[in-house]
Image: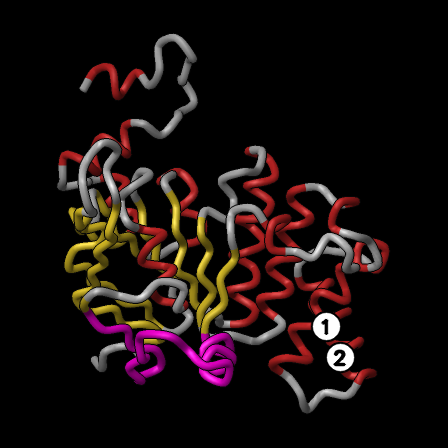
Amino acid sequence: MPEPEKVLDVRGLAKNFRVRRAGAPGHESVLAVDDVSFSVPAAGSLALVGESGSGKSTCARMVVGLERPSAGEIVVDGQTWPVGRLRRRERLRRGGFVQLVFQDPYQSLDRRQRVRDAIEESLRLHAGSLDATARRGRVDELLDLVGLDSRQGDALPKALSGGQRQRVALARALAVEPRLLILDEAVAALDVSIQAQILNLLADIREQTGIAYLFITHDLAVVRQVCDEAVVLRHGRVVESGPVERILHAPGAEYTKRLVASIPRADWHPRRGNRAADAA
């Protein structure tokens, strides 16, 4: 059986940061990502899971070019991507393959710009062949895809709820028609009920468009709904990887077991915590 096509292949990725410690002379090197490898098949969905400081978001930022890798290789659609300072043409080319949705969309939206104008701006940058009428029609399609109506499309970001703003961020990213969408803690700031809506939306979008996801999260509870595979990171290193269902039900690494045990269950109580975790 042939190996599935990979939209993203990360090989031996590493990232060193130079930091200054309080009261210490000079700088020291901190290894934030250490020999991390993973791949995302076309139309597939992979989660990078770990606590704060595990290196998962740094991996995402290196994939899109916001951070420069200290070592390793990033291959997208079979092409090795260059590292270092990117020219505008290269940034646009890369943006046509990969888009990134952040945890707080309000910070990435122009607060003076209507929702539909923000989406149309992406189309002007990446779909230059569309005229004004075609762009407006495409904006309407994208609003409908993410569950927003024309009234919300004419609104400013401040008039929308957090869940609605995250839908705007998704529509703007999808306007580019990327092969891969990176979701960096994209539901972490939302209420649980709104999280469920956005996760269902992401599952529907993936089914309709065939886009691939790289899902960055600290919460294993949200992974099952949108991801096929998961890579668990701790202190910048991979501790476990495999199918999501196997990791959730039969984790091998002790660190993964603790993450799974921390997932709130139906019998969860704020004083008792998880009974399963207490019994472990």
Q: Which residue range is magenta in the image?
A: 72-97
Residue at x 58% of width, y 75% of height: 176
User: Where is residue 154, by image quadrant?
Assistant: bottom right
Structural crowding at the residue carrying mark 2, measured as other residues with C-alpha within 10 Å and reported as few (<14), some (14–19) or many (≥20): many
Q: Is residue 257 left or right of residue 220?
A: left
Q: Residue furthest front?
A: 25
Residue at x 31% of width, y 27% of height: 262
Residue 10 at x, y percent in the picture: 25, 68
Residue 240, visible in the rendered structure: no
Tell me which numbered mark, 1 or 2, is placed earlier along the sequence. Answer: 1
The one nearer the camera, 176 or 228, is 176
Q: Quickly name the residue at label 2.
A: 135
The one nearer the camera, 28 or 244, is 28
Q: Residue furthest bottom?
A: 129
Could you say whether the residue bearing mark 1 is in a helix, strand or loop? Answer: helix
The verdict on residue 186 being magenta is no
Q: Badges 1 and 2: C-beta atoms under 8 Å apart? A: yes
Amino acid carrying label 1: it is Glu
Quadrant containing the C terminus in the rendered view? top left
Q: Is residue 60 left or right of residue 107?
A: left
Tally the numbered discs: 2
Q: Quickly name the residue at label 1.
A: 120
Structural crowding at the residue carrying mark 1, measured as other residues with C-alpha within 10 Å and reported as few (<14), some (14–19) or many (≥20): many
Amino acid carrying label 2: it is Arg
Residue at x 26% of width, y 66% of height: 69
Indicate which disc residue 157 carries. Answer: none
Could you say whether the residue bearing mark 2 is in a helix, strand or loop? Answer: helix
Q: Is residue 160 left or right of residue 84?
A: right
- Tell me: residue 178, above or below residue 148: below
User: Where is residue 33, by image quadrant?
Assistant: bottom left
